Amino acid sequence: MKDQTTLIIGANSDIAKSLAVEVIKTEQSHLMVITRDSHFYQQEQFNNSDIFLVADYQESTIQKIVTDLNKQLTAPLSQVFICHGLLHSEQVTPEKRLQSLTENAFNEVMTANALTPILWIKNLIPTFKHRLNQKQACKIVVFSARVGSISDNQIGGWYSYRASKAALNMLIKSAAVEFSRTVKNVKLISFHPGTTDTPLSKPFQKNVPEHKLFSSEFVALQLLEIVKNTNIDGEASFVDWQGKTIPW
Ligand SMILES: NC(=O)c1ccc[n+]([C@@H]2O[C@H](COP(=O)([O-])OP(=O)(O)OC[C@H]3O[C@@H](n4cnc5c(N)ncnc54)[C@H](OP(=O)(O)O)[C@@H]3O)[C@@H](O)[C@H]2O)c1
């Protein structure tokens, strides 16, 4: 009997796919995913999952999808994973020097990494407060990165990506303060997966020792265990794949 729902947003991320594969193995949790590319989820193993395909992540799209999702929700949300992350693309290259920073790339990275995740959380607030969820604790994980730690920044560079993850962390911290008064059954977790072998890290894996380059399957299992063992305490946490706290 599926009495809980896991929601994975930005589900075409390699780590998200590994999370999804683990979640559908469980008896307890129904799976809902949201992505711009649903090819992976057309496999038979996801026949009982709800797949929401979006064209973009503008707020009007987010609002529409949340409305549709609420109509289909039969078991309360217990875990939400928000996996958006943009480090490089045809238009974006992580900056080694400040001179490389451009307005367009900065705005694109900030939108994907900080604004879009918090817009999902904002629009899901009524869902967390809904009667289905009143007694159900829900853990929300946003994918951050250690380079978003302001106190840990020793080597600089990657201006836009660092700033976007630092901004995401601050948004999560502030939301946790508000939620401790208003949405008490929710825990917010900023998660650093470690360097993981995915398209996002591909161009930057050269100097990473083999034992420090994780598979997405390993990271997904670590994260599910961390989420299971994390209590609802009214505070935001910033943790790595071992569950170790990272300074903000
Ligand atoms: N891999 C690493 O070494 C590493 C290290 C530290 C932190 N992280 C973080 O972990 C998370 C997952 O990354 P991954 O390695 O699994 O990456 P990935 O496989 O490249 O997945 C990229 C993700 O970002 C979303 N995305 C890409 N461009 C976007 C845009 N312009 N607007 C909104 N969403 C966009 C994709 O959503 P769709 O499903 O819609 O395509 C997908 O969820 C990211 O937040 C990343 O920053 C990764």
Image (cartoon, rainbow, N blue to C red):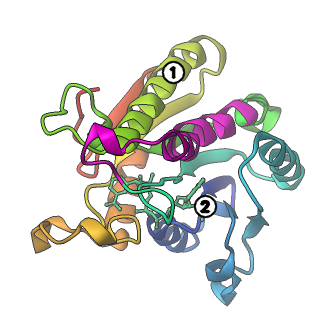
Q: Amino acid at mark 2?
A: Gln
Q: Nearer the viewer, mark 2 or mark 1?
A: 1
As drawn, the residue found furthest toward the top would be 181
Quadrant of the rendered image containing residue 116: top right
Q: Position of residue 168 (x, y in %)?
A: 47, 33
Start and end of the magenta stretch? 94-123
Quarter of the image with the N terminus is bottom right
Residue at 51% across / 59% down in the picture?
A: 91
As drawn, the residue found furthest toward the front would be 99
The number of numbered badges drawn on the structure is 2
Quadrant of the rendered image containing residue 169: top left
Residue at 66% across / 15% down in the picture?
A: 182
Along the line of sight, the residue nearer the viewer: 109 or 247: 109
Left or right, residue 72 beside residue 245 = right
Q: Main secondary structure of the magenta part?
A: helix
Q: Amino acid at mark 1?
A: Ala
Residue holding disc 1: 176
**Mark 2 vs mark 1: which is more N-terminal?**
2
Residue at 34% across / 34% down in the picture?
A: 238
Question: Residue 28: which disc?
Answer: 2
The residue tagged with tag 2: helix, strand or loop? loop
Asked if residue 16 can be seen in this view, the reply is yes
- Asked if the magenta segment contains residue 184, the reply would be no
Quarter of the image with the C terminus is top left
As drawn, the residue found furthest toward the bottom would be 44
Q: Position of residue 197 (x, y in %)?
A: 31, 72
Left or right, residue 5 beside residue 148 = right
Q: Residues within 10 Å of mark 2 (few under 14, many from 20)?
A: some
